[in-house]
Image (spheres, rainbow, N blue to C red):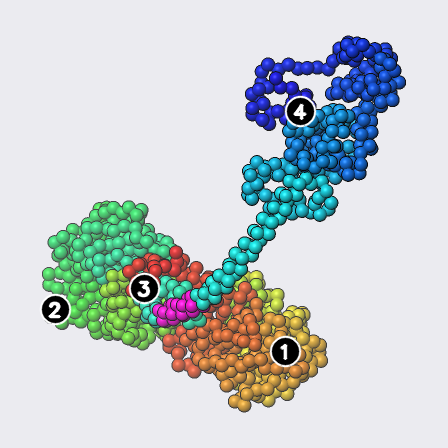
Amino acid sequence: MLGVRADFYAHCAEYPVLVDALRDAQVLVGPMTTAELRSAITQPALDVGCRVETALVSELIADATGQPGVLPLVSHALLETWRRRRGTTLTLAGYRTAGGLDQSVAHTAETVYTSLSDTQQRWVRQLFVRLVALGEGTQDTRRRVDRAELDPDNPETTTALERLAHARLVILDRDSVEITHEALVRCWPRLHSWLTEDREGLRIHRQITDAVNAWERLDRDPGALYRGSRLSQASQWVSAGGDSALSTREQDFLRASLAEQARDQLVAHRRATRLRQLLAVLTVLLVLTTAATAYALRARHVSVGQRNLAITQKVLSQAAALRATNPALAMQLGLAAYRIAPVAEARTSLLNMFTTPYAARLTGHSGAVNTVAFSPDGHTLATGDEQAVRLWDSTDPTRASALATLTGLTGPVSSVAFSPDGHTVAALGRDDAARATIRLWDVTDAARPHRLASMAPASGLLAGSSLSFSPDGRVLASGGTDEAGHGTIRLWDVVDPGRPHELTTPTTPAGPIYRVAFGPTGRILATAAAATADLRRAHEVRLWDLTDPARPREVGALTGQRGFVQVLAFSPDGNSLVTGLDDAVTLWDVRDPRQPAASGRPIVVPAAVSAAAFSPDRHTLATATADRGVHLWDVTDVRRPRALATLPGAAGTVSTVAYRPDGRTLAVGGLDPVVRLEDVAEYAFPSRAEGRVVAADFSPDGRVLATAHVDGTVGLSDATDPFRLPEPARFTVDPNGLPVIAVAFGADGHLLATTDGSGRVTLWQVGDTPGSGLLTAVLVDSSSPSAPLTPALAFGPDRRTLAASGEDNSVRLWDIGDPHRPRPLATLTGFAGAVNSVAFSPDGHLLATASTGASSRLWDVSDPLHPRSLGTLAAPAAGQVLSVAFDPRGRTLAVANVDRTVGLWDLTDASHPQVRQTLPFSGMVHSMAFSPDGRRLAAGAADGTTSVWDVTDPERPQPSDTLVSSTSVYSVSFSPNNHVLATAGVDWSGQNETTPERSIRLWEMDAERVATRVCGLARPAITPAEWERYFPGLAYQPPCQ
């Protein structure tokens, strides 16, 4: 049988055995009824011949009613009342004297306690707190204690226990001790104070007691001793006075714990000492190993770096050689070299990547490419090789891709042509029997072409002849010969290209006709014939009137052609006809086809001419020669053609060229089985060569580039794409054609200042978008054509001040607050020679000047009405100062000297400037500019180089990039976003008048942006085989992946 108090019932659920025992057969014992309690009070007394007063019964019942666990108290109260009985009667007076129900037990305990000696009292206190189980969320309860816990060998223990047991305060068993009445825990004030005085200490003591019991059960195993925080906590409690409460066993336990801790600490100390010794040894070994490893890694890093640098230098040289023939591969090699070793040389090569126009390559031809032609909309390119005609998607020439192959011709395709509506392609080649034939295909859907018709092979059709559609698309012409060897013109009606039929075959007395070309009106057809077999008739070019294609009529002939005419092409306006034979190209005026005449002297080319084509705007003529070259000529004035450029050579002789209708791409084919799509956008506007650029300046927002031209004009170009500078809007500054030598934007971007060759300084109003300038005012007007070319011109940051040099070795300051009514402010004099350059500091308080008088000077212009000289900066003995430039913070002034050096001056104290560094250059520096972020200094020199220095630390400048131009650089200008550098310059000697090179360049200075551009263009990607060839031993890492 198991009895459980109701308030402890829930705790039974924590023990699985009790859960099973309590699940069934429970008897809930409720409180006694009044009758039961009355019987429990009176009946025991009656059984021994005693009587209980009725008043006592009533009061006792009243006191006990409603109190839980009251029966032990009732029992003890009756016992104490019996001891105070009157005779055999238990009286109410005796009950009250005993303390009543609540205080009787406490009264007894207190009486016994006070009767004990001091030693016994201390022991009783320790005993009673041991006999109480401290409640956690419940009331404190009595606790049964093993006698071994109470130092049973102590005589004081025995005496005290007997006294308590005699007073019925404790119950003694053979092995245990327990409080008789649990009510004593609640009702005895002294015990309550003991339990609350140091409750946390009691818990610690109880934990020690439990630990001692466990230690004893394990035969005092050292593993059961206190350690760590528990021992520390117990020791602190003992030190605070808790030692008096400890039993002998508990003291032994703590002493053993402390001794074990000391042993552990000694072992740990010895172990730590050994570990420190070992660690010291290991540290020395580690240091030695790390040093050796670091040395090995450093040596390996140096070795790898040297290897990569050697590979990079070699690859850069190979890429430069490939740039002309395989630009896609060359660009990828240059980018990969930069990725492997990002040294200055590789970065410079990367930035110079686009100095040669990019050419996309179309591969996959079976042999030499004999003919190329663009569709009228430019979206499709047809190429003819040794076996077939191939169609390519040329919507984006930089990403051209194969569409389809036109079959049916087995021999070399000599000519291919699109009909004017772009729906039909005609090609001349050979059939399976090696006979000359013409095939027509419907290419309305260029990806799915289908054959329309074949002109049945007929005698006299020449396999090597050319084809030409009439501009209305109704007639197709080719050349041929008859049985006598005379030339014939083969004309077909192709109104219905599915059913073509021959119109007529006019015969000429000359030899076989190889070249035919319709004029843009369709009225005139030009033919070129070879000499007759008996040489009685020379090579001839004839003009035919095809107003009625069924009745062609010869109207004129070109005279003086002494050789095989390889080239025959009309200009888009029909006014000119170009012929080419041997090493000469001749432009003919055919506005009157009855009397054609040479427009001027023939253009002499380096080798035999093989092909020619006019640009769609007729201003440019592309010629191909047997020396693998393609030459571009400005034929705006057909009487005086001017060389524009020579495009990089192909791998073999060039035999065919064709312009895309937008004039920005030139298709080139030849013996090399590759078609190159050359980017000729920069040459699409020959007026650039005619007005070569002397100087350039970006607008403050970077959207517009102003350029000063040698022909007396200023150009305004959209500069938002540094890789593609469009044709500028031009306006005339000097009507006499004297060069414009300086140009500068005002701070708001709407005011433009120019200086021309006469020394005149002019203000112009310009709009937000490139367009013509509106003359605002003339500040300085000189009629002297011999005025020195001094491009000294600068706006102040206040938007009101302009500084400009004059022909009288002076600098004038102008108030341009009202640009329509500028007024002079002051004149700076005292220069020993012409002023080459002026520059304002960013705050506008200083003006720096450079002159041919071998000096640069600083001026305080904070009050522009009263400028004052701050002194002269020491100049080299070699001579004049060419240019000055402030950094964006105004703390550094760059001064370019004629001895090919640039001095960096510290202007922290403008009254006492000090030279920080002197930078060497390969040529005389004419112009300088700091990047807007102040981190770079660009300097353009007479030898065509623009050197860029990293001046982040002006005390330790480092060379960064070298940009190479083909002419002297007289002007450099950074865009506001730091990314783009404009350089401009011309050859004033006139030696390059016939072959002018680019005189204005935009350089993208952000290597990663250049890399993005490279990866957007270069196709196909470098192959593993190519990688291994150029980067042997390095893992395959295509730079654009």
Question: Which label sits on residue 8?
Answer: 4
Q: Which residue, given by chain and number where applicable, does mark 1 sit on?
A: 907
**How far from the left and from the top, in percent, is residue 953?**
56, 73
Q: Nearer the viewer, mark 1 or mark 2?
A: 1
**How far from the left and from the top, in percent, is residue 387?**
20, 56
Q: Earlier in the sequence, mark 4 or mark 2?
A: 4
Q: Earlier in the sequence, mark 1 or mark 2?
A: 2
In the rendered view, tell whether residue 917 sits above or below residue 747. below
Locate the C terminus by quadrant. Answer: bottom left
Q: CA distance from mark 1 to mark 2?
A: 85 Å
Q: CA distance from mark 3 to mark 4?
A: 83 Å
Q: CA distance from mark 4 to mark 1?
A: 92 Å
Instruction: Classify residue 586 as left or right of residue 691.
Output: left
**Residue 203 in sight:** no
User: Which residues, given as a range, are shown in magenta?
Assistant: 291-313
Q: Nearer the viewer, mark 4 or mark 2?
A: 4
Circles 1 and 3: CB atoms closer than 8 Å:
no
Instruction: Classify residue 27 as left or right of residue 556.
Output: right
Q: Residue at x 64, y 29 (%)?
A: 175
Q: CA distance from mark 1 to mark 3?
A: 52 Å
Q: Earlier in the sequence, mark 4 or mark 1?
A: 4
Instruction: Name the image quarter holding residue 683.
Output: bottom left
The local crowd at label 1, few if under 14, some if 14 to 19, many if 20 or more residues have their Cα within 10 Å, is: some
Q: Residue at x 44, y 71 (%)?
A: 344
Q: Amino acid at mark 4?
A: Phe
Q: Residue at x 19, y 63 (%)?
A: 513
Locate the N terminus by quadrant. Answer: top right
Q: Secondary structure at mark 2?
A: loop
Residue at the outermost bottom position: 877
Q: Amino acid at mark 1?
A: Leu
Question: Which label sits on residue 533?
Answer: 2
Q: Which residue, given by chain and number where applicable, does mark 3 sit on?
A: 1033
